[in-house]
Structures are given as structure tokens and as C-alpha cells.
Image: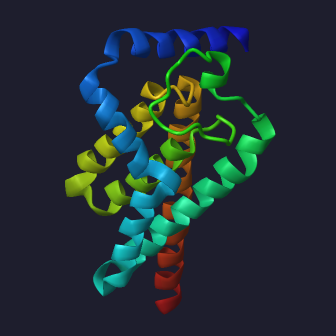
């Protein structure tokens, strides 16, 4: 665990020492804000649900977000109870309010990759945009020193697993309904 913590801290220090700049100091809080409580993804899912043609996609997206939240925020954060990096390095000047929850996994990253997985599946033409936004939200958590890289990596994995499970469930249901109609 010490080895992982050393890698995490070295990556965070690299970002602070080599990537920190005035433009990112403005942009990264903005990207984090977009990911707060999965709000951007919830809004997109509600918009999709409100359009009859895309209702199913919106429901699948919302389902993936719910699963990701239950697993990450409801279960893993309270199981692991990892303190945030700014608590370890108190000299860091935060650009956002101090988050009060545990660090592992990154909820912003989990919801972003759950959403990008579903949206990329249904809207392949825009897949690169969804994943770019998810990556920017995830990176913002590192830049802002509120998550360790391993928190973000776990969020990516958990988000993609959540989207995969939900897509599989909905696609299986579609196949089962097709089989019944034969």
C-alpha cells in the first residue's frame, strides 16, 4: 500500500509542479463543477428521457449512473475510507471547496465514465466527445488535489463496469423480449 501511495503522491506532485497554470486554474474547477454529483450526466439523461425517440437511452444512462453511485458512493467509499490527498499535504492551496466525503473511488470519475460508456454506445458518432469530457472531469480531480490517481483509475474502471452491466441487462432484456415474440 505504501508503494501505491508513493506513486499516487509523485503523480500529484508532478501535476502540481509541471502542469499548474493560470488557464487550468480556471478550467479545472469548471470541469469539476460539471461533474458535481453527476449533474451534467443527469441533465443529459433527463433530456433524453423527455424525447420519446431517445427515452430508452436516457433510462439506460440514468440506470448506469444509479448503479455507479450505489457501488462507489454508497459502498466502496465507506468500505475503504481513504482520506483525501489535501489532508495529507495541508500546504496545498485548493481552488475549490474542500470535499467532505472519502477519496476512493472518485465519484466524479465514476459517474463520468458510466455516462460516457452508455452515451458512447448509443451515440457512436459523438463517442470521442463524451469520453473527452469524462477524461477532463477525471483529470480535474487530480489537478485540484482532491483525489489520488488510483482513486481516478478505480472510478474509470467502476464507471465502465457499471455502464457495461447496465447495457448488457438492457440488451439481454431486448433479446429476451424478441425471443418471446417469435
Where does residue 181 sit, x and y in percent of width and height?
Answer: 48, 91
Question: How many discs appear?
Answer: 0
Q: Residue at the left extreme? A: 125
Q: Nearer the viewer, residue 133 or 92?
A: 92
Residue drawn at x 48%, y 62% is 167
Quarter occupied by residue 8: top right
Residue 83 is at least partly visible in this image: yes
Q: Residue at the right extreme? A: 79
Where does residue 75 sit, x and y in percent of width and height?
Answer: 74, 49
Where does residue 142 sit, x and y in percent of width and height?
Answer: 47, 27
Residue 90 relative to residue 77: left or right: left
Quadrant where the N terminus lies? Answer: top right
Residue 164 is at least partly visible in this image: no
Q: Nearer the viewer, residue 95 or 51?
A: 95
Where does residue 66 sit, x and y in percent of width and height?
Answer: 59, 63
Quarter occupied by residue 50: bottom left
Residue drawn at x 53%, y 76% is 173
Q: Nearer the viewer, residue 103 or 70?
A: 103
Residue 85, above or below 119: above
Residue 158 relative to residue 81: left or right: left
Q: Residue at the bottom extreme? A: 181
Residue 122, above or below 120: below
Residue drawn at x 54%, y 78% is 176
Amino acid at each position: 500500500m505504501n508503494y501505491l501511495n508513493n506513486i499516487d503522491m509523485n503523480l500529484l506532485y508532478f501535476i502540481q509542479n509541471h502542469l499548474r497554470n493560470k488557464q487550468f486554474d480556471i478550467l479545472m474547477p469548471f470541469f469539476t463543477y460539471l461533474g458535481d454529483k453527476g449533474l451534467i450526466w443527469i441533465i443529459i439523461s433527463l433530456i433524453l428521457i423527455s424525447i420519446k425517440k431517445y427515452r430508452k437511452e436516457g433510462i439506460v444512462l440514468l440506470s448506469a449512473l444509479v448503479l455507479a453511485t450505489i457501488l462507489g458512493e454508497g459502498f466502496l467509499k465507506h468500505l475503504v475510507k481513504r482520506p483525501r490527498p489535501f489532508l495529507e499535504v495541508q500546504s496545498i492551496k485548493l481552488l475549490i471547496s474542500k470535499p467532505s466525503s472519502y477519496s476512493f473511488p472518485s465519484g466524479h470519475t465514476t459517474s463520468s465514465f458510466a455516462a460516457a460508456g452508455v452515451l458512447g454506445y448509443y451515440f457512436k458518432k459523438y463517442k470521442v466527445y463524451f469520453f473527452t469530457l469524462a477524461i477532463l472531469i477525471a483529470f480535474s480531480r487530480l489537478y485540484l488535489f482532491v483525489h489520488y490517481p488510483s482513486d481516478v483509475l478505480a472510478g474509470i474502471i467502476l464507471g465502465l463496469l457499471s455502464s457495461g452491466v447496465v447495457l448488457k441487462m438492457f440488451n439481454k432484456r431486448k433479446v429476451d423480449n424478441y425471443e418471446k415474440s417469435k
